[in-house]
Structures are given as structure tokens and as C-alpha cells.
């Protein structure tokens, strides 16, 4: 398993919103390309939901844009601890059918990991290949052969 802890792959800049915030305000925050989702917190620490672009699209389709975040957020939230290896985090995402995991320690929200933030760590490990044969060579003249 990949031993790099999730804390090294998390993004601690993900915006946080309250569940009573308007969907319009939340959608405005999600317009920024660097924001994959909004973490919903109602007390200082606990994560109560996640609001993604697809949640906003569903709200628009249902005519719910004048509602609050609470009515459209994804819940319950699957979380992960900062010391969890990135390989286990990727497995947890796959099994839960989610693409984002809030990182939580002692009920305190620390950051967010996504497929994009995990990919460099997981891909790098899976590309470590042991090759016992002769090196692969490409013959430039072979491309011209019929």
C-alpha cells in the first residue's frame, strides 16, 4: 500500500460554508476552477456536508436555487484522518463512490483530498516498475518499414 499520509496530499484552502447559506452564494464560490467543492460546517469543527458542482446543477434542475445549502448538500460525509495512507484513501473513495474526502482529526476539519490531489501520489507509486529484461529500444528506422 502507498504509505504517504493523506495530510501530504490534502488541500487546506477549500472554502467552508454554513448550511444556512444561500445556494446562490455557494454557487458563486464554486465558479472558481480551483474550488472542487465546499465543505459545510455549522459549528467550529464538525463537517456536516459537502456541496459539489453536481449538487448545484441538481438544485438548478429542481428549481431549488433559492434554497439553503442544507437542502442540496451531500450528506452523510465520508471522512478520513490525516495519517491515513493515500492508497487507503483512494480505496475508500472508490468503495464509497465519492471523489472528495474531508480530512478530519478529533472532529476538527483540516482539509480536503480529491482524486486530483491523490493522483500524483498514487500514480507515482504504481509506476514504480521492476524490469528484469533488456532495456526496451525503439528503432527509428522501423517506423519507415512497410
Image: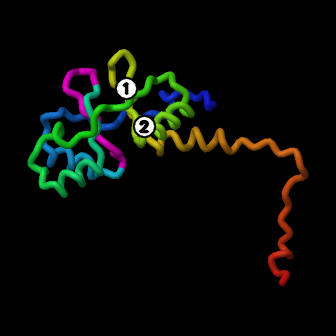
Residue furthest to the bottom in view is 146
Residue 133 pos. (x, y %)? 89, 49
**Is residue 36 located in the magenta-colored stretch of the structure?**
yes
Using the image, tell me which numbered label, if any, was put on residue 5: none
108 vs 93, left or right, is left
Q: Quadrant of residue 78?
A: top left
Above or below residue 46? Residue 58 is below
Q: Considering the numbered disc 1 on the image, is that residue within a helix, a strand or a loop?
A: strand
Q: Nearer the viewer, mark 2 or mark 1?
A: 2
Q: How is the image coloured?
A: rainbow
Q: CA distance from mark 2 to mark 1?
A: 20 Å
SS state under label 2: helix
Q: Which residues are magenta?
A: 34-46
Q: Which mark is residue 110?
A: 1
Q: Which SS does the magenta portion mostly show?
A: loop
Quadrant for residue 146, please give it: bottom right
Is 127 placed above or below 11 here? below
In percent of width and height, residue 15 lies at: 28, 37
Q: Is residue 145 magenta?
A: no
Say few, some or many: other residues with alpha carbon within 10 Å of mark 1 (under 14 / 14 to 19 / 20 or more). Answer: some
- Residue occupying image coordinates x 27% and y 35%: 75
Q: In the rendering, at what x and y percent does residue 106 appear?
A: 36, 15
- Tell me which numbered mark, 2 or 1, is placed earlier along the sequence: 2
Instruction: Name which residue lies at 20% across and 43% down.
Output: 72
Residue 2 location (% of width, % of height): 62, 32
- Looking at the image, which residue sits at the far front? 95
Tag of residue 96? 2
Amino acid at each position: 500500500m502507498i504509505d504517504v499520509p493523506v495530510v501530504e496530499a490534502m488541500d487546506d484552502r477549500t472554502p467552508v460554508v454554513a448550511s444556512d447559506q444561500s445556494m446562490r452564494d455557494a454557487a458563486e464560490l464554486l465558479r472558481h476552477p480551483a474550488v472542487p467543492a465546499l465543505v459545510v460546517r455549522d459549528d467550529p469543527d464538525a463537517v456536516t456536508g459537502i456541496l459539489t458542482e453536481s449538487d448545484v446543477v441538481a438544485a438548478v434542475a429542481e428549481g431549488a436555487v433559492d434554497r439553503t445549502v442544507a437542502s442540496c448538500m451531500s450528506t452523510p460525509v465520508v471522512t478520513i484522518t490525516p495519517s491515513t495512507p493515500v492508497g487507503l484513501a483512494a480505496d475508500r473513495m472508490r468503495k464509497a463512490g465519492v471523489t472528495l474526502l474531508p480530512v478530519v482529526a478529533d472532529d476538527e476539519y483540516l482539509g480536503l483530498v480529491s482524486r486530483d490531489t491523490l493522483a500524483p501520489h498514487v500514480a507515482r507509486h504504481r509506476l514504480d516498475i521492476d524490469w528484469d529484461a533488456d532495456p526496451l529500444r525503439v528503432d527509428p528506422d522501423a517506423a519507415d518499414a512497410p
